[in-house]
Amino acid sequence: MCCAGCQAVAQAIVDNRLTEYYRHRDALPESPREAMPEALRDLGLFDHPDFQKSFVKPVGEYEREATLILEGITCSACIWLNEEHVAKQPGVTAVDINYATRRARVRWDERRIKLSAILAAVSAIGYRAYPYDAGRSEQLAQQERRAALRRLFVAGFGMMQVMMYAVPAYIADAGTMTADIESLLRWASLLLTLPVVGYSAAPFFRNAWRDVRLRRVGMDVPVALGVGSAFAASVWATLTASGEVYFDSVAMFVFFLLGGRFLEMVARQKAVRGVEALARALPAFAERMGHYPSRETERVAVSSLARGDVVLVKAGEIFPADGIVVEGRTSADEAMLTGESKPVEKMHGADVIGGSVNRTSPVVVRVTQVGNGSRISAILHLMERAQSEKPRVVELADRVATYFVAVLLVLAITTAAVWSVLDHSRALWVFVSVLVVSCPCALSLATPAALTAATGAMSGHGLLATRGHAIETLARATHFVFDKTGTLTYGRMHVTQTICLGPCEAEAALRTAAALEQYSEHAIGAGLCEAAGDAMADLPDVSAVRTFVGRGIEGTIGGIRYRVGRIEFVKEIAGSQRPLSAEGADDEGQSPVALGSDLGWVALFKLHDQVRREAKALIDTLLREGRKVSILSGDAPGAVAAVAQILGVADARAGLSPEEKHAYLLNLQRQGAVVAMIGDGVNDAPVLAQAQVSVAMGGGTDLARTQGDFVLLSGNLTDLGRGVDLSRRAASIIRQNLVWAFAYNVVAIPAAMAGWITPWMAGIGMSASSLIVVLNALRLQRRNSPSLSGLRDNQWDAV
Amino acid sequence: MDILFLLIPLSLLLVLVIGVVFFWSVRSGQFDDLEGPGYRVLMDDDLPPDNDVSMGGK
């Protein structure tokens, strides 16, 4: 960003009163074009549909959504400014910005505004926005890092040298130093402080200036005021050869501030690196076998792969897309995508995930999903959504921080006025100290830093937070409600028994059931289809298929209406006599599924599902922590009771429809419970949406359609236990950070007002304060914290 | 003490030179990776990567 261009542009906005910007866009002064011609010429390109295809997502008919990356953000106030400004553009329907990743999610109405106009609006207030892509983001991070390093170096080196020139003045007895030597030292200090103030501290001034132009107080205003007034007083003293100079303090102060910011930036970049790594996980090229099964391969760009292509993936290479193994067997490392740290065996017909690593031997894979439909891109999208949503706490902290700065300015000026009466010579010092020592940054960083770190750590364990509020709410959850099938159990149903109820054969009944169930996404459907086995190849044709969520499926085969599903559901068409009671439909741990037609009952299937071996450990941990656990299931009472007994859950309800589950949650919430619902993300979507926080099992299901504030990518409940633990620790770290930020300011500001703190001490204090907040948050990323390994031990004990 | 009138400007000049050298080194990317070069000394590129070793690191 160029300073002159910025000023000119800022001027233009103020003249146009911000919102009027677009009407006068053609009248925009030429200077910004000169200052950053390349950037502005680029903007037009962004409207091109081909170019937009890669990063713009249609939401409604005309609404579009894109993720942008912002350059030039230095504090949370910048976020506020950008959000306000962009939201004011006509046609922009939503915008939210994440501080830690500097990413903005923008929605707009294509008929009323163009993407280039939004980008131009951002650059009009002195920031720059680009469509997000991982390479660009990396480049920006590097640029930012280099610029910060240069500034830090200039400040540090200047500080040391200026101190050398200042020491003689400190240690010399009165009268031993001649006036011309003293003047020489002062001039040398002035020359060295000039780059420190003019170059290193430039961002503070620039941001402060921008804030002032836009008539608000940002966090850099007090800093700029402090540095500026101390420097100006010193220059005046040097020019007139009178009074005191403070060059050493100014340089030192700038150095400490920049040092703090630099470390904070490194920590922040570290925190987002996990997401970036995922975005870069796909390789650039793939070996396509154009004429499979012929062995010849050609090297093609991964972006040109299409569904149905066959690719060769050698050992050690990365799978270029989602697919199915058609030849060979190997093991894959899916740690980055699912958090599963052990390699996963891949046989013929197994699904592989694009971005995972083929570890042992070469395999031939048929591509099933590429681009936006692939699992990795669904994961990325969910992650981005989580990061761009701002939890309420963070918004509150930002607002408090803004007021805080305003109050601080008033305090500083009052203090300066009082001191100038008490002790004129110290007034400037105290003024500068008060401005510098306060740390609104720690306040506004406290929550986002912890949330970002926790999100990163969780996704490392296969638990993906997809909503901004998710972590905070999970920590508060008092009630954990589990679905049974596929959540507490593996969801792999096996048909253990087929009972014919009418004149039919078991095999024919299975075929009919499988023909209907192939349209189901429920685990029972998969179980029945599996049982049908080879018969799956030639199933009878089904027409008029209707799915009744939580109840069953209806369809017409050969002119007869069939229903498969819960007994009551089939009863509606098959007639009221139910010849089953004697046969013990509610066997321990067995789920009954009925098949019937308009003509009567056909068959009853019994399916069995195994309880996940890690479920017991998780539930024990939750109960030990004093959280309440319930099971809500649509399954038969016998099966549910068996699972509840194994897991030691007292509150288990069976045979519930989705509406009843919903009502149950509502009732819990009325009693003041904070409910966390864990279920399969597709079938349970409405129930999940009712819970304050929801976890969707993301193991095998269609991720792009999955609803849930969290997605458990690994499908391993141990990871959920870790996630709960992490969320609790994140909540306590947020609390610590906020307490620290408040306590620091409450102690430091009065101390500075009393004149006990010199500006350099203030500089260290402020930098340390925000650094402590960030470092405290980074504790969440340590992989083997004691409580986590404790949980893991429990799990193995239970097994 | 008149020599100070020479030495102090000289020190300023020196600071300038050091500053220029540092800017050049940042620009050429010497500070982009502060960890990698340390490991590079220890690693022998002639050996192929061993899968089992990478597993142990998990």
Image (tube, coloured by chain):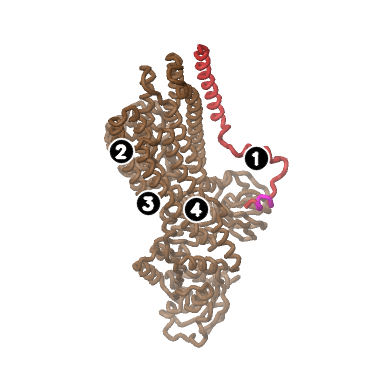
Residue A637 position in % (x across, y down)? 47, 78
Q: Which residue is mark 2?
A: A411
- Image quarter hosting the C terminus of chain A: bottom right
Q: Name the residue nearer the viewer: A274 or A54.
A: A274
Q: Colour of chain A?
A: brown
- Give the distance between the C-alpha atoms of the residues marked 1 and 4, in whole angstroms: 32 Å
Q: Which is closer to the viewer, label 3 or label 2?
A: 2
Residue at the top extreme of this rendering:
B2
Q: Which residue is mark 4?
A: A379
In magenta, the rendered stretch is: B52-56
Residue B53 magenta-highlighted: yes
Query: In the picture provided, is A759 more to the left or to the right than A24?
Result: right
Q: Secondary structure at mark 2?
A: helix
Q: Name the residue nearer the viewer: A762 or A34.
A: A762
Which chain can be seen in red? B
Query: In the picture provided, is A316 more to the left or to the right than B6?
Result: right
Q: Which residue is mark 1?
A: B39
- Give the distance between the C-alpha atoms of the residues marked 3 and 1, in whole angstroms: 42 Å
Three-letter residue code for mark 3? Val
Query: In the picture provided, is A18 more to the left or to the right than A53?
Result: left
Residue at the right extreme of this rendering:
B46
Secondary structure that dominates the magenta span: helix
Three-letter residue code for mark 1? Tyr
Residue A388 position in % (x across, y down)? 42, 48
Of label 2 and label 4, which has the lower sequence position? 4
Residue A381 magenta-highlighted: no
Let me know if residue A97 appears in the view: no
Three-letter residue code for mark 4? Ile
Q: Which residue is mark 3?
A: A393
